[in-house]
Amino acid sequence: MTSEIALVPGAGRLEYWDPRPGLRRPIPLWTYTPAGFGPESPIVLVMHGMKRNADEYRDNWAEAAEAEGCLVVAPEFSKAAYPESRDYNYGNVFKDDERLLPRDEWLFPVLDRIFLHVKARAGSRREQYALFGHSAGGQLVHRLVTLAFSPLIEIAISANAGSYTMPVMDVRYPFGLGGTSYTTEQERALVTRPLVILLGDSDNDPNHHSLPRDEAAMRQGPHRFGRGQAYFEAGRQLALKHEVPFAWRLEIAPGVAHSNAGLARQAARIASRR
């Protein structure tokens, strides 16, 4: 269910409602429409971090959106409506970290629905969208690519994530795939998907206040920069194991720490295939 507020040039906002079973929850969509936007212009969904500050993420991307000619859509999954990490970062895959939920209750498919809604409102002819997430949003993005990849996604960019779902079965989700019944065919497909791991090389503070410190997360590396490289290498090794092409890319942002704003221009270029 949606409101009828139209897209406007520059900064805007649309109301959207979570279509999944359960409580009726709002998902405000903070948008930025560049001056040169047209039916073939790229559309980028920008996923916020743990502060749930989607409006600020949209603002961080405004200059990049104008430069690259892409429509930016930043959905807001508020703390009030989505209070726990499992509701957002982890994709609502498990109930209380124990019971695997039905796929129609997962968060991941909601993003396709948002894209299709915005596409219609914008008069776009794009058949696919780019998906970007920073920090907690980066966690969400790579977990979506792992468990619920959609053909509507042209490219996915996971930036400065604090923890990863490693492609191993002996570590329980969300830090591994234990409990998900992941198959060999799914492993093979995972490493052939268009995933970019984007890392600021100064996001290397082992004492950062929001760095996940779960035991399984700490085994992934001392800081976000190290963990991202470890995840990328795990994917590379999985591709070698299964003898399939490795489609992931590792992109480094020199001098950037834990900052969505610092990554926006580089991410927008990647999202726009430039």
Image (cartoon, rainbow, N blue to C red):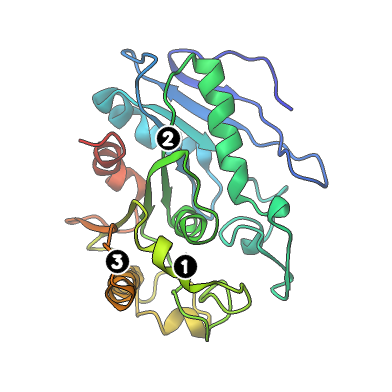
Q: Amino acid at mark 3?
A: Val
Query: CA–CA distance between discs 3 and 2?
Result: 25 Å
Based on the displayed image, in which of its 4 quarters is residue 111 positioned? top right
Query: Could you say which disc has been placed on residue 129 in the image?
Result: 2
Q: Reading the chain from its start, which is encountered first: label 3 or label 2?
A: 2
- Residue 185 is marked as 1
* SS class, disc 3: loop
Front residue of this view, candidates 85 and 121: 121
Residue 22, given in percent of the width and then of the height, sits at 83, 47
Locate residue 132, reporting x and y percent: 40, 45
As shown in the figure, which amino acid type bears the numbered disc 2? Tyr
Q: Residue at x 20, y 35 (%)?
A: 274
Q: Residue 244's mark?
A: 3
Secondary structure of the residue carrying numbered label 2: strand
Q: How far apart, in angstroms, are the residues tagged by discs 1 and 2?
A: 25 Å
Label 1 Cα crowd, 10 Å radius (few <14 / some 14-19 / many 20+): few
Residue in the picture at 53% in, 72% down = 183
**130 versus 185 height, above or below:** above
